[in-house]
Image (cartoon, rainbow, N blue to C red):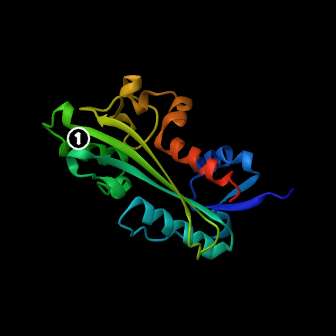
Amino acid sequence: MDKQIVVLASDNAGKLKEFSRILAPLHMEIRSQGEFGVPDVPEDGLSFVENAIIKARAACEHTGLPAIADDSGLEVDYLQGAPGIHSARYSGQGDAANNAKLLRELEGVPEGKRSARFQCVLVYMRNPMDPTPLICQGSWEGRILFAEQGEQGFGYDPLFYVPEHNCSSAQLPAGEKNRISHRARASALLLQALGGGR
């Protein structure tokens, strides 16, 4: 049986490997949009859902194939959900500066008011005009620490405290993080939904 080729609306090699593993039971061949020369598109939506749809639709339009896109980020309750959809470019200067800015914004805020969560939205579109794209969302609850802890992971991981493990996301073994993270939860829902004969 021929594998269905699905375009991942990303050039991230780590994401390509992860989605290939997750969707392996569905006999899909996941290929990076870079293989098809899909250009990056402005992520100018107002939500994770809108941005993921924008990316998936662009990949579908350019390739004529089904596409998967994700958009994710960190929501801090005290900051009314910021950095949110701007998580990757919160400071405009990369991960270390993003973390430093987040700590500044939360300076003096007590532990009980530092609740936060990582969000991941995955979108699967069969074609650019798909009226019912599959949308799967996963959340990972925690809180923001007062200082960075741990060397694993990336982004906000050193500041994100995971209560059930009593450590930061950056202190978790990679396998455990990949089992319980926001992306893992959204991916499990996507696998379930696609396995339903979509």
Callout count: 1
Please state if 178 lies on the left or on the right of 197 as rendered.
left
Q: Residue at x 52, y 47 (%)?
A: 186
Where, by quadrant of the figure, is residue 63 drawn? bottom right
Q: Nearer the viewer, residue 74 or 159?
A: 74
In the image, residue 5 sits, relative to residue 103, either above or below, namely below
What type is the residue that disc 1 sits on?
A: Leu
Q: Residue furthest top?
A: 166
Q: Quadrant of the C terminus?
A: bottom right
Residue 192 drawn at (x, y percent): 63, 47
Residue 140 drawn at (x, y percent): 41, 40
Residue 64 drawn at (x, y percent): 68, 74
Q: Residue at x 27, y 32 (%)?
A: 145
Residue pointed to by mark 1: 103
Q: Residue at x 56, y 68 (%)?
A: 132
In the image, residue 127 sits, relative to residue 70, either above or below, namely below
Q: Quadrant of the N terminus?
A: bottom right
Q: Nearer the viewer, residue 155 or 73?
A: 73
Q: Residue at x 79, y 57 (%)?
A: 3
Dot 1 lies on which element?
helix
Q: Nearer the viewer, residue 152 or 30?
A: 30
